[in-house]
């Protein structure tokens, strides 16, 4: 949330779907519109927030291009990023088959550039989470649990870096956040756009 730098005068477009971002950002912005990636409203927004994980392959380039088109201010993108050995991408897709493949940091930067954007700033951070709440929405939680347990017992790396804290299994996700703007835009737009 802090990375997006929401302001009370922001007119915000949320393209996060069911991620919970809309409810988290609502108190911090003046206006909030939520939309599906394929049905972006016309208009100018001072802040656009979107995860890339549920947009397939080259569709990510198209989405970023469209977000840059409808935004007169800041576009903030978020996605899981592949940073370690193992196939964390596969584990994420076992949990949610709609998820696109996990990209490296460089690949995410390339998506922005191919969409006609430039990255103003970026951040990457690692989050450790308890596995059970995350598995509650999984299509095959037992299979994922078995693979993570096997890794704890010396089996092949999954990319999720599981570990036990007390008697509870935890895993790790790495997230990348990008603040982007169209190539050639002179600077930041402040305040509310004219309608």
Image: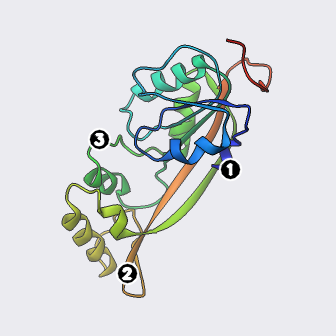
The quarter of the picture where the C terminus appears is top right
The spot of residue 15 in percent (x, y) is 48, 33
Disc count in the image?
Answer: 3
Residue positioned 50% across, 38% down in the render:
107
How far apart are the alpha carbons under marks 3 and 2?
Answer: 27 Å
Q: Which mark is residue 98?
A: 3
Image quadrant of residue 56?
top left
At 30% from the left and 71% from the top, the residue drawn is 148
Front residue of 166 and 36:
36
Which secondary structure, mark 2?
strand
Label 3 or label 1, whichever lies nearer to me, is 1
Which of marks 1 and 3 precedes in the sequence?
A: 1
Give me the C-alpha separation between circle 3 and circle 1: 27 Å
Percent across and percent down for residue 76 are 61, 37
Numbered tag placed on residue 194 in the rendering: none
Residues 120 and 114: in front is 120
Which residue has dot 2 on it? 168
- Disc 3 element: loop
Q: Is residue 179 above or below residue 85?
A: above
Which quadrant holds residue 35? top left
- Which badge, 2 or 1, is on the more N-terminal residue? 1
> For mark 1, does the 10 Å Cα neighbourhood hold few (<14), some (14 to 19), or many (20 or more) residues?
few
Tag 1 residue: 2
Distance of label 2 from label 1 (alpha carbons)? 29 Å
Label 3, residues with CA under 10 Å away: few <14, some 14-19, many ≥20: few
Q: For numbered disc 1, what is the local secondary structure?
A: helix
Residue 171 at x, y = what percent? Answer: 42, 69
Left or right of 146 in this view: 62:
right
Q: Residue at x 73, y 17 (%)?
A: 184
Image: 69 above or below 29? above
């Amino acid at each position: 949330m802090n990375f997006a730098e929401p302001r009370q005068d922001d007119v915000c477009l949320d393209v996060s779907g069911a991620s919970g971002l809309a409810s988290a950002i609502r108190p911090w912005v003046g206006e909030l519109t939520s939309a599906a990636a394929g049905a972006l409203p016309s208009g100018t927004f001072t802040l656009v927030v979107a995860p890339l994980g549920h947009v397939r392959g080259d569709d990510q380039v198209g989405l970023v291009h469209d977000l840059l088109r409808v935004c007169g201010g800041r576009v903030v993108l978020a996605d899981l990023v592949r940073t370690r050995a193992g196939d964390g991408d596969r584990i994420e897709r076992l949990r949610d088959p709609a998820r696109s493949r996990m990209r490296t940091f460089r690949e995410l930067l390339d998506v922005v550039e191919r969409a006609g954007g430039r990255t103003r700033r970026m951040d990457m951070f690692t989050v450790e989470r308890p596995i059970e709440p995350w598995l509650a929405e999984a299509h095959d939680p037992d299979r994922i649990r078995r693979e993570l347990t096997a890794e704890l017992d010396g089996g092949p790396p999954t990319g999720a870096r599981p570990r036990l804290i007390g008697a509870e299994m935890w895993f790790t996700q790495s997230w990348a956040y990008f603040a982007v703007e169209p190539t050639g835009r002179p600077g930041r737009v402040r305040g509310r756009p004219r309608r």
